[in-house]
Image (tube, coloured by chain):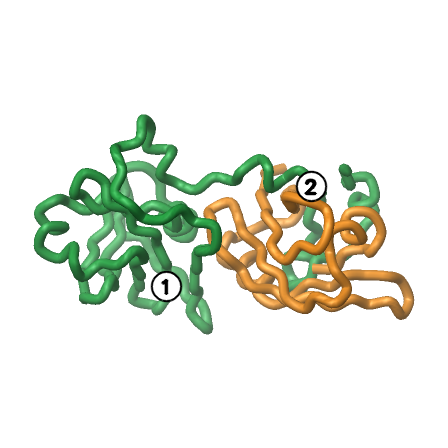
Chain colours: A orange, B green
Amino acid sequence: MMLKYEGFREMLLDKSNTTIKLIDDCGNRWDCYQVYQSLLEKLFKIGGQWKRMVDARRMKHLVYMKLGAPTAGNNMTFYISFRPI
Amino acid sequence: MILNCFGSDFGDQINDYALLVDKNGNEFAMRVKRINGSIFLTRGWAALGDFYDIGLGAWFTLRFMGLSRFDIRKIKSKVKREISIPVFTPPMRFLIERVGLPPNVPYVFPASMVDLSFCHDPANFQMSYEKQLSADDIKSGFLVNNHLEQYGTRL
């Protein structure tokens, strides 16, 4: 997962964090890693079990994903829900 | 729900969490709740339904293997058609988040069964951000930035 640094990510993701947890709408936990990239443009790249979750949930493209966090600041746990097209 | 008769015989061998394993090695962690002497598999159950793509009326054959572990023997749909079990290498593991769960004390039956299953707390979406997944996000394993993301940001 690659996210631009500005906006949401700037407020909620910490550059020094390397691991985050994603909690999906079934209550399952997926351990992901994140890499902060600042070479060409500022990006957060999130990998790890993201691909496993996509496969397990049989997600198709054009699905809307909502990423949420309870507060601004340094979050290590994010909640995601999906909405069909 | 696991029946009272089973619970009275083997309930002491089931902890707060159970593990269901199918024949292809996929694992599902489940939260166990005890209500009025019965055992309920609550959080994590929804993942199982979603994974096998089954709905109301499906049949599961579980075998208790001891130490909170169950093996999934057969899954049949409502019309008794056997459901094929997806193969993943390595096998899929569905873990549940244990932090922040209330203690597992016996409590009275909830007014609605929905209360037993997991649902997101709206407070966890106070800061939220929505994005439409592209084909690249699905295939490459990375969620790639696109223009929609710019407009999807809500703060």
Depicted B90 relative to depicted B43: above or below? below
Q: Amino acid at mark 2?
A: Ser
Relative to the observer, which residue lies in front, B144 or A47? Answer: A47
Q: Name the residue located 45 percent from the left edge and 73 percent from the top edge.
A: B90
Q: For residue A65, say whether it is visible.
A: no
Structural crowding at the residue carrying mark 2, measured as other residues with C-alpha within 10 Å and reported as few (<14), some (14–19) or many (≥20):
many
Q: In what element is the residue under mark 1?
A: strand
Residue projecting furthest to the right: A40
State whether discs 1 and 2 lie on one chain: yes
Between tags 1 and 2, which lies in front? 2
On the rendered structure, is A71 left or right of B23? right
Depicted A85 relative to depicted A2: above or below? above
Number of numbered discs visible in the structure rendering: 2
On-image quarter of the N terminus of chain A: bottom right
User: Which residue is the site of mark 2?
Assistant: B128
Depicted B57 relative to depicted A56: above or below? above
Relative to the observer, which residue lies in front, B8 or B131? Answer: B8
In the rendered structure, the residue with mark 1 lies on which chain?
B
Q: Amino acid at mark 1?
A: Glu
Q: Name the residue located 70 percent from the left edge and 55 percent from the top edge.
A: A74
- Alpha carbons under labels 1 and 2: distance apart: 30 Å
User: Which residue is the site of mark 1?
Assistant: B27
- Location of residue A36 in the rendering, given as x and y in whole percent from the top left corner: 78, 66
- Location of residue B143 in the rendering, given as x and y in whole percent from the top left corner: 70, 57
- Location of residue A84 in the rendering, given as x and y in whole percent from the top left corner: 59, 38
